[in-house]
Amino acid sequence: MSADHTDDAGTTAPHGHAPHDHAVDCTEALSRLFEFLDAEVDELEGDRIRQHLADCEPCLAEYDVEDHLKKLVRRSCLDAAPAELHVRIRQQLTILRTQVELG
Ligand SMILES: [Zn+2]
């Protein structure tokens, strides 16, 4: 009977993944999501964020539209998100999800 103590690596790597060093990381992609969706980032930046989301399913899964909309509404002191914004966000999501499925 020998107890195996090989599980002693002690690596405390942060839970996460970083597959794309050259692009925005998950944190940045998610934190800039609003600006991206609201077309407040420039084209290049928006492209990098979109690219990340298209490549990164965990991020896309985080991409809870309703939840983000509620936060956006709260931040903007509005009673409800403008229908226009809903539509735009849904369009962006459809595009992103299509890209992921095709990719
Ligand atoms: Zn990601």
Image (cartoon, rainbow, N blue to C red):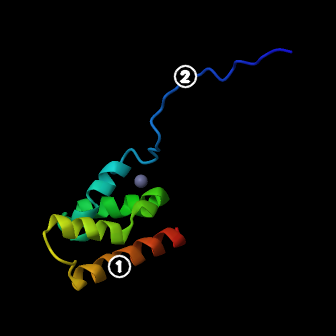
Determine the residue positioned at 17% across, 77% down. Answer: 79
Determine the residue positioned at 35% across, 79% down. Answer: 90
User: Which residue carries the number 1 mark?
Assistant: 90
Outermost residue on the right side: it is 1
Outermost residue on the top side: it is 2
Name the quadrant of the N terminus: top right
* Secondary structure at numbered mark 1: helix
> Residue 88's image quarter?
bottom left
Outermost residue on the left side: it is 77
Measured from the top left, where is residue 68 in percent x and y?
30, 66
In the rendered view, would you say 11 is above or below 22?
A: above
Marks 1 and 2, the one that precedes in the sequence: 2
Measured from the top left, where is residue 21 in percent x and y?
39, 44
Measured from the top left, where is residue 60 in percent x and y?
43, 63
* Secondary structure at numbered mark 2: loop
Amino acid on which disc 1 is placed: Arg
103 horizontally vs 39: left or right: right
Determine the residue positioned at 46% across, 59% down. Answer: 55
Counting labels gives 2
64 horizontally vs 7: left or right: left
Q: Residues within 10 Å of mark 2 (few under 14, many from 20)?
A: few
Mark 1, ligand 1, within 8 Å: the answer is no
Give whichever of 56, 3 is nearer the camera: 3
Mark 2, ligand 1, within 8 Å: the answer is no
Any mark on residue 10, and which? 2
Residue 35 visible to the viewer: yes
Residue 43 visible to the viewer: no
Circles 1 and 2 in contact, beta carbons < 8 Å: no
Determine the residue positioned at 21% across, 78% down. Answer: 80
In the rendered view, would you say 58 is above or below 13?
A: below
Amino acid on which disc 2 is placed: Gly
Q: Residues within 10 Å of mark 1 (few under 14, many from 20)?
A: some
